[in-house]
Image (cartoon, rainbow, N blue to C red):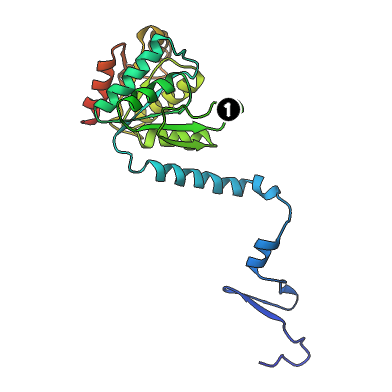
Amino acid sequence: MASPEGAPAPGERRLGPVLRRHEQVQAGTTDQRLLDSEGPSEWVHTDPWRVMRIQAEFVEGFGALAELGPAVSVFGSARTPLDSKEYDAGVRIGRGLVDAGFAVITGGGPGAMEAANKGAWEAGGVSVGLGIELPFEQGMNPYVNLGVDFRYFFVRKTCFVKYARGFVVLPGGFGTLDELFEALTLVQTRKVTRFPIVLFGTTYWSGLVDWLRDTLIAEGKASMNDLELFHLTDDVDEAVALMSKEVGI
């Protein structure tokens, strides 16, 4: 088609549905610019790109765990000594959960997490580790046979809850408390249902339970019924039985 009289002859390029003419025409093609460009790399640290990485982590985590079957997440301190009663309890809990028909999910690190993974692995079950990128690298413990590493805590915590039927919480620190109270909040607000939470170790957890009852509830910040959101025990068989009973296995 001829150009209108007096108008410059249009250079023209179509890029999918987009038409570019005159000074809007870009040199090269989209593929060429992708493959040849060595431009600035700051874009990999921008929020839009982080959103893509977050999405990718959800996709990878969901994809890896989608066919896991019934599972229980076991939490506890990375600092639990190998020769401690807590470590032995973690091993027995992991083994008992597998014998009851569950896979075992932990944070994949050492200490109590390793103990639960070890028990699950020794029982021939699925032993899952959901690791996290930290400034002090811990690495995945050797008893994990299905592992996923995450950059973002909230993506990892979503997977802990989404693919578990309940939590067993061994003595632990801030990370363990974070995971415990997130689970309690989700159950209290009915974001998840039929989700048993077992605090293992009455001596360790009794001070927290006393504070919940005598301070939190006494001052009206929660109700007495909220104490029924979790169970307290020192018995491995009871912890496993509570999981099986409440989720119907």
**Residue 196 percent location from the top left of the image:** 30, 25
**Vertical relation: 45 (above or below) 111:** below
In this view of the protein, can residue 210 be seen by the observer? no
Q: Quadrant of residue 248?
A: top left
**Vertical relation: 216 (above or below) 2:** above
Mark 1 crowdedness (10 Å alpha carbons): few <14, some 14-19, many ≥20: few
**Which residue is depicted at the point 71% across and 90% down?**
3
**Residue 185 percent location from the top left of the image:** 40, 27
Q: Residue under label 1, please give it.
A: 137
Q: In which quarter of the image is residue 24?
A: bottom right
**Residue 19 percent location from the top left of the image:** 63, 76
Quadrant where the image shows the C terminus: top left
Q: Nearer the viewer, residue 233 or 2?
A: 233
The residue type indicated by label 1 comes to Glu
Answer left or right for 120 relative to 51.
left
**Which residue is depicted at the point 49% across and 29% down?**
140
Instruction: Give the secondary structure at mark 1.
Output: loop
Q: How many marks?
A: 1
**Residue 151 percent location from the top left of the image:** 55, 37
In this view of the protein, can residue 233 be seen by the observer? yes
